[in-house]
Amino acid sequence: MKDWTEDTVVATDYWHPLPDGRVQCDLCPRFCKLRDGQRGLCFVRANDGGRIVLTTYGRSSGFCVDPIEKKPLNHFLPGTPVLSFGTAGCNLACKFCQNWDISKSREIDTLADAASPEKIARVAAALGCRSIAYTYNDPVIFMEYAIDVARAARERGLRSVAVTAGYITEAPRRVFFEHVDAANVDLKAFTERFYHKLTGGHLQPVLETLEYLHKETDVWLEITTLLIPGENDSDEELDRMTRWVVEHLGPDVPMHFTAFHPDWKMMDHPPTPPATLARARDIALKNGLHFAYTGNVYDPRGNSTWCPDCGQELIGRDGYVLGTWNLTADGRCNRCGRPIPGVFEARPGTWGARRLPVRLAAYD
């Protein structure tokens, strides 16, 4: 028996009927096969009378204005505010999820904030945001809602940011990323063992998403890897991962190595030592990556952007607060003239480290 209401239901395109009466969802490589009234693992997509629908359109688990560096994006409109929101559920089952209260939620009450795409864009503009981020849980699973928000955002001159695990099949991948200006993709590890054991997914579809974004779109791309002690932090794995990025995506795609803290179903693992992040950054730089960052730790050098040619500090960061700014108006090192890849403006934003929770009902 279905447990959703028609006011939040919209049709979707990526599914097909099966001979046994079930319907297969083709949005992601999980390919959930659902009986009538049954939800997929993601929670938000379901079989409604022989068709796959999105059941949570127009509902959010909350809105917040963040610094863009928190996504993390270091080469996309630095210093500017971004209106962030998510829904509920996820199409992966990461045992280490840091947003498990949202991504693992199976409660409609989690989706307390109702908002149309037009209202989200209007409020984002009113708050001085330069972009809207689909985050907290993966926007792939609510792509119809995210796409409509992105369309409304573009009408107001705002950009769209996807924070995603990249676990999506080819056809919807092409449609979804047509509406995205920047993406931070979680490359959770570089072994199939890790993906199978700790996420319930597979590595190859994520690599395919990364290559698609780099080679076939204009989406600004950055990558994040959460390093978990004993699981994906060996020199050998970090060496293979960063070599793959340089070979397949090029040396200018920024990588962020961030610290794990015990959460969800991995409370028995220790936090990531700062030295592990520094080691990962060193391996990435040694293998030819031009921009490698540390995250979730205090490390001004590892958080900052440096010129690959002359070594000058280009963008100094103390946490989410920008300091040094040595880029020219057209995004070059002001000492040696090297072009720095990214989406930059003549001057950085001044939002800083503020976090501003927003209730959209206050903007009626």
Image: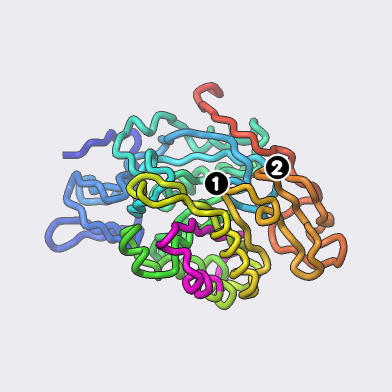
Q: On screen, 25 above or below 193?
A: above
Q: Give left or right: position of 2 versus 28.
A: left
Q: Are marks 2 and 1 in contact (CB under 8 Å)?
A: no
Q: Nearer the viewer, mark 2 or mark 1?
A: 2
Observer-nearest of 173 and 108: 108
Say which amino acid is labelled 2.
Val
Q: Mark 1 or mark 2, which is nearer the start of the sequence?
A: 1
Observer-nearest of 251 and 11: 251
Q: How far across and how far down the image is residue 328, in percent?
A: 84, 56
Report the residue at 87% width, 63% height from top: 335
Residue 360 visible to the viewer: yes
Observer-nearest of 259 and 135: 259
Near mark 1 (Cα within 10 A), the count class, few <14, some 14-19 or many ≥20, is some
- Name the element at disc 2: strand
For residue 134: magenta?
no
Report the residue at 43% width, 30% height from top: 114
Residue 157 visible to the viewer: no
Near mark 2 (Cα within 10 A), the count class, few <14, some 14-19 or many ≥20, is some
Real-space Cα separation, disc 2 to disc 1, in angstroms = 30 Å
Q: Give left or right: position of 331 versus 260.
A: right
Numbered badge on residue 151: 1
- Name the element at disc 1: helix
Report the residue at 57% width, 38% height from top: 83
Q: Quadrant of residue 99?
A: top left
Bounds of the magenta segment: 216-242
For residue 229: magenta?
yes
In what quadrant of the picture does the N terminus appear? top left
Numbered badge on residue 321: 2
Q: How far across and how far down the image is residue 71, in percent?
A: 56, 48
Q: How far across and how far down the image is residue 41, in percent?
A: 28, 50
